[in-house]
Each structure stands twice: as C-alpha cells, then as structure tokens.
Image (cartoon, rainbow, N blue to C red):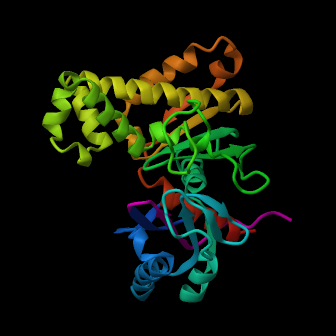
Amino acid sequence: MPTAKPSGIAVGVDVGGTNTKIAAVTPTGKILREQSLPSEVAAGPAKFVERVSAVITSWRKEGLKVQALGLGLAGDVDSAAGTLRFTPNLRGWDGFKFRDALARKLKLKAVVENDANAAVWGGFVVELKRKPKHVVGITLGTGVGGGLVLDGKLFRGATGSAGEIGHNTVESGGAICNCGSRGCLEAYAGSYGIVRLAREAVEKDPAHGSVLKRICPDLSKLSPRDLSTAAEQGDEAARQVWDRVGSLLGVGISNLVLILNPECILILGGVSRAGHWIIDPLKSVLSAKPFRTPFSAVELRLADNPNAGCVGAGLLAFEKESR
C-alpha cells in the first residue's frame, strides 16, 4: 500500500543551549511563521514546554491549523519514548518526557528527535532535494552534532544514538568535553571549544592576538564570529585557531567517509558561517588521504538554510504523520 503524502502544517522546534527556534512549515519545508525565544535551560523542561506551547497556541488562535509537532533536542534522544536520555548542553533536562508533556498541553501528536538528526533531515529534504541517497550531516553550534541519511532514510542505529560525531575522539587525552570525555571533536569544533582555543592562543602569544583583542577586549565574551572577523583582518592567532579547528574536523569527517562512504557531507549550524576559514583546512585533510576512492566521490557542502533544525523537526513530524 503506497504511503500517503503529507499535507497541512506542522510546527518544528529546534532547541539550542541558548536559543530556541520555532517554525510552522509546509510539507515542502516552506516556513509560514517563525519565532525565536531564549531556551532558559535553568528554568527546567516543564517551564520550557509551557513557553513553547504558548507560542503554538497563539498561532492556532490566529487561524493556523497545526496538525503535528516535531521537537529537536541536543543530546541522546529516545525517539520511540519521546524522552531525552542524556544531554551535555541542556543540564537538568535528562529523563523528561517531552512527547507526553507536549501532547497533554497541545493535544497534538509530537515527534521528539535529536536536534542534529532533525537539522540534517531538513537539509536533506530542502537543500539536497533527497537526491544523494547517502549523506553525513554535521551541525556546528554550541556543540557538534551529526545525522546520517543512508539509502534515503534517517539512520538512528540500535539505540537511536547513531551519528554522534561530536563525541568521537580526535585527540587522545585532549581537552575535556561537556559530555565528560576528553579529546572529543566537540571540545575543539563546538563554539565553546573554539573560544577556549582562541583564549589559549592569545595567552600564549599576545602579539599574535592583537586584532582579536581589539575586536573583543573582554575575551570572556568572545564568539566564533569575532574570531572570523579577526582572521579576515589578519590576526595570526585567529587564523591558527581556525586551522586547528578545521583540521580536527577533517579528522572526524575522514573517519566517517571511510566507514560510511557517503555521497555528500553537509555542514550546518552557526559555526559553519566561518566559511573558508574552517573549510580550507578541512579540505586539506581530506585531500591528503591516500585511499582516494571514497574521498574523490564525496561532495562537501555548506548548508544555506539557517533554519534547517526547526524545518527538519517539522518535516519529521510530517513523516511520522503520513505512516
């Protein structure tokens, strides 16, 4: 029996450690309404559900006919149970039953998914038009997430934990990650890791970080965007940091290329806005690999859509609804 085509409107929610994006989307990924609000992690998950529900309720009162809801959460998600099992960046939210709480509040079917899975699915459907069948997606934000689309389908693995590229070890015994391990890719390519590397570089050689310090005199408030600006203006410390971040990202991606042999690597998230500063050293690592067959076949792409997370969460809600 053929699968019914999804129709109507779904709401996708992309929950970050700092901010949350909410969007009402069509089955093609067109955004009809959108809103951002602070995640306020310390207030707890129950309060968060209330705040998100208030936004969706206001949209319904304005005439938006919402049929399904998708929620993307940073961490180890049990999508079957609709719970967040473990999260390095949403402290205190572990174990909360998001699907049940949202269903009670909104009387809607809710799909709960890892945020990177949602973002990669959004990129796969909207940007890649479902054409490459084997895609590795990497989200670069506060943390580093990953999602796998294999044979055109989202691959979750045995426990729903597949694609956690951010917690692969790229430097044995290295910097501590928010997950508690050492040397994870996230500890270097997540925004908090990048900022740490920049501070260390300036402390080691203040002369090389003169432009960076002028742009952001208080290094405790440094952002990856500041680091990109400093690199553009010739700051040697900033350029060295981006070189290290891109090279370690290349190590993590190389492992995935060799294991999964994808057609496309799709890089999403705010940190990806560093553009060539992060991509050039990444490409250098990939081009140096002697086993050329899988590396020659893979396309590296930066996603254009800054809303892939909330769009993808909504699209996954449609997928569930149409089964």
Residue 36 relative to residue 302: left or right = left
Give how far across and how far down residue 177 sits, in percent: 51, 45
Q: Quadrant of the C terminus?
A: bottom right
Q: Is residue 99 visible?
A: yes
**Which residue shows up at 67% across the image and 14% down it?**
292
* Residue 15 painted magenta: yes
At x 58%, y 58%, the residue is 75
Residue at position x 55%, y 57% in the image: 115
Location of the N terminus (image quadrant): bottom right
Look at the image and give the residue range highlighted in magenta.
1-18
Chief secondary structure of the magenta span? loop
The percent coordinates of residue 26 (x first, y second) are 53, 66
Camera-side residue: 130 or 101? 101
Q: Looking at the picture, tell me which residue is in the foreground, 159 or 55.
A: 159
- On screen, residue 262 above or below 8: above
Residue 7 is left or right of residue 275, and the answer is: right
Seen from the viewer's position, the closer of residues 101 and 122 is 101
Residue 94 position, x and y percent, is: 58, 68
Compare residues 294 and 184 and report the one nearer the observer: 184
Vertical placement of 190 versus 38: above or below? Answer: above
Q: Is residue 61 magenta?
A: no
Instruction: Please tell me which residue is depicted at 16% across the width and 27% down the height of the picture.
Output: 210
Give the residue furthest to the right: 1
Task: Give the vertical position of 38 relative to 162 (above or below).
Answer: below
Q: Quadrant of residue 297?
A: top right
| Residue 276 visible in the snapshot | no
Which x, y percent locates residue 4?
74, 67
Instruction: Check the image and report above or below for 261 versus 161.
Output: above
